[in-house]
Structures are given as C-alpha cells and as structure tokens.
Amino acid sequence: HTKHSADMDALKIKLQPVVEAMKTSVTANVEETKTALMPILESVRAKLSERLENLKEMATPYVEEYKEQLKEAYGQAQSVKPEDLTALKEKITPMAEEVRAKVTEMFEAIAATFKRS
C-alpha cells in the first residue's frame, strides 16, 4: 500500500505540469472560440431580429383587419334582441326535428342494407 501510494504521488508530481498546461490551453481555446463566435452570433441575432420585424410588418394588416371584424361581429351580436333570438329558436326547432327524423331514416336504411349483406 505504501509503495502504491508513493508511486501515485510520483505520478501526480510528474503529471502536474501537463495538467497545468492543458488547463491553460483549454482556457485560451475557450476564449478564442468565444471571441470568434461572438460576431457570428451577433450576425445571426441581427438577421433574426430583421426577419421577425418583417414578419410583424407583414402580419399587422391582417391582425388589424381581424380585430375590426371581431369588433363588428361583437357589435352585431350585442344588437340582437332576446325576443328575436326566441323567435328564431321557435322557427328553427320544427325544422331541426324534421332534419333529425330524415337523418334517422337515412341511417336506418343504411343499417338495414348492411345488415342484409
């Protein structure tokens, strides 16, 4: 155990300068890489900002038109009287029942056809 510890200490002492050189080299390489990448990142950021701005300019008229349509639809919905809605419901209910009956007949005919086959 003592010999092994001594060998490890000797190896540690021998490798210490190599480790220090690697640390220095890595630190320098990181700084060089960072320095080289910053202009590229700034260029990408500028192009992305420009394209987002163009997209925003292109979409703004559509958004404004949509807002106006929503405001108009909301105003129309507010102007409908409850009595008108009740009258419309009374008018549509019998028609809806007729449609429901016809659709039921159609599905029964379809089902009967497939049951026979």
Image: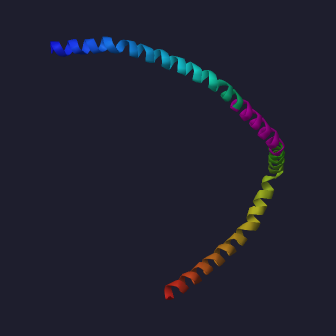
The part of the image, by quadrant, that contains residue 52 is top right
Q: Is the residue 94 above or below the residue 45 in the image?
A: below
**Residue toward you, 113 or 2:** 2
Determine the residue located farthest toward the left in the rendered image: 1
User: How many marks are shown on the rendered structure?
Assistant: 0
Identity of the residue drawn at 74% across and 67% down: 92
Compared to 11, does 116 lie above or below?
Answer: below
Residue 98 at x, y percent in the picture: 69, 75
Color style of the picture: rainbow
Residue visible at 54% across and 81% down?
111
Question: Is residue 35 found left or right of 27 in the rendered image?
Answer: right
- Inspect the magenta stretch and tell me whether residue 112 lies in it: no
For this view, does 34 lie left or right of residue 55? left
Which portion, as a residue range, is magenta?
Answer: 44-62
* Residue found 63% across the figure and 24% down from its top: 36
Q: Main secondary structure of the magenta part?
A: helix
x then y, percent, for residue 29: 54, 21
On whether residue 52 falls in the magenta region, the answer is yes
